[in-house]
Image: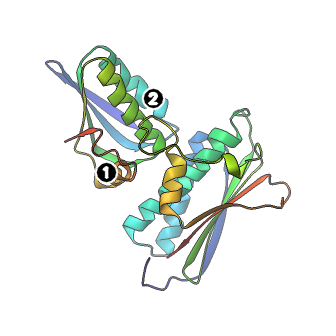
Amino acid sequence: MSSATLENHSEKKAFLVKSSSLKEVRTFCRDVFEKLKIEQSLKDELVLAIAEAAQNIVKHAYKDNQDSNDIMVVKISCEDNKLQIAFYDMGTPVDPKKVKHREIDNIKPGGLGTFFIQEIMDAVEFKDGKRKPWINHLVLTKQL
Amino acid sequence: MSYKISEEGNITTVHLDGEIDMDVVEKAKEVIFPHIDSGKEVHLNLSQVQYMDSSGISVLIESHQKALEKNTKVIIKDVSKSVLKVIMMAKLEQILNLE
């Protein structure tokens, strides 16, 4: 948690749902966190959490539709030192009960992205209520 | 991601450069795995890798496990501070061979 008071700020950007967009997602996040003057170590963690969530959309919500030209939207908001990152996509509906990371002591490739997100963020929530045209609406929050 | 390979005796060193994410993970495997499969000791130099996500970590785990199967080893060298943090978050610093 940071003791500095950050300016309220909100920014969003759309990206093609492709693995090649992940670099752009990270660049967008770094630019926003630069404006918010978030210190480097925390910035790195937040960028990782956001990139992992975006990767999950590409990898899981579009698992059977990898040639799609759909977009996903990432919205970063900071209000009263509370950071909220929202993700919107039109992929396969996510069942929040099935979203879990592997046991961390079970050493094998895969299943770490969700673990990283949960380690870094305070809360991870799939919102109910569809806002057309979006199917999935994930919100990550962290008190700064 | 770019890479450079150097060989000395039975040791192949793969120098990776850039950001390792889902988009380049197959390329990273194509670069690293054949050397492990040939039974060589592989050194992965990560000094120029400034970002690695869970996909990149999976390549490190897979490389380590593949090396065990082939009775050789993969040593991760000169890991950057930012990547080390991710390795530690995954609680792998005692599992992978870090130097």
Q: Amino acid at mark 2?
A: Lys
For disc 1, the neighbor class at 10 Å (few under 14, some 14 to 19, many from 20) is some
Q: Residue furthest top?
A: B38
Q: Quadrant of residue B71?
A: top left
Q: Secondary structure at mark 2?
A: helix
x and y percent of residue A82 in the render? 57, 77
Which quarter shows the C terminus of chain B? top left
In the rendered view, would you say B64 is above or below B89?
above
The residue wearing badge 1 is B84
Q: Residue furthest right?
A: A132
For disc 2, the neighbor class at 10 Å (few under 14, some 14 to 19, many from 20) is few
Colour theme: rainbow
In the rendered view, would you say A138 is above or below A42?
above
Q: For residue B50, which numbered disc appears in the image?
A: none
Q: Earlier in the sequence, mark 2 or mark 1?
A: 2
Label 2 in the same subunit as label 1: yes
